[in-house]
Image: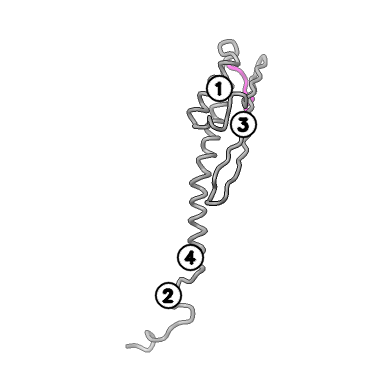
Amino acid sequence: MDERDSVVRNGERGEGGIQGFIWLAVFALMLYAGWNVIPIYVANYNLADKVNQIARSPRGQVKDEQILDLLMKEVRENNLDPYIERSCFHVTTLETARRITCEYERAQKVVPGVAHTFHFTLSADQPLIY
């Protein structure tokens, strides 16, 4: 046996210690929080994209009530119907543009024991296609 093999270097004993466990726990909580929160933002982004598309609908062919029907269809497709009602949308159609606004809140458990209410505001102001 070589003398170098028997010498234990300071700080190189192969022990992980409590600090490694704490970092692992923090990393696991961050992954869990992301797993719970990211789908909320994805659903909101998808709805905002559809609201912009619907806002461009022709004024003469699509009335405001039909716009609300299309919006609620998108709400159901994105599984947001527990959070958004028809009355949350405000549609204003002018001569050359349409404005759609919506505000809603969504409560979600982020990590065990911690819940957060996310507030979203959608707004689309698009020129009308004739």
What's the amino acid at mark 1?
A: Ile
In the figure, is residue 12 to the left or right of 113?
Answer: left
Q: CA distance from mark 4 to mark 2?
A: 14 Å
The residue pinned by badge 4 equals 21
Q: CA distance from mark 3 to mark 4?
A: 41 Å
Q: In the picture shown, does residue 44 fall above or below 97?
A: below
Task: Tell me the SS state at disc 4.
Answer: helix
The residue pinned by badge 1 equals 54
Disc 4 to disc 2: CB gap under 8 Å: no
* Residue 88 colored in magenta in the image: no
Pick the quarter of the image with the N terminus. Answer: bottom left
User: Which region of the structure is painted magenta?
Assistant: 124-129
What's the amino acid at mark 4?
A: Phe
What's the amino acid at mark 3?
A: Leu
Image coordinates of residue 13 in percent, x first then y, are 44, 78
Mark 1 surroundings within 10 Å by alpha-carbon count, few (fewer than 14), some (14 through 19), many (20 or more): many
What's the amino acid at mark 2?
A: Gly
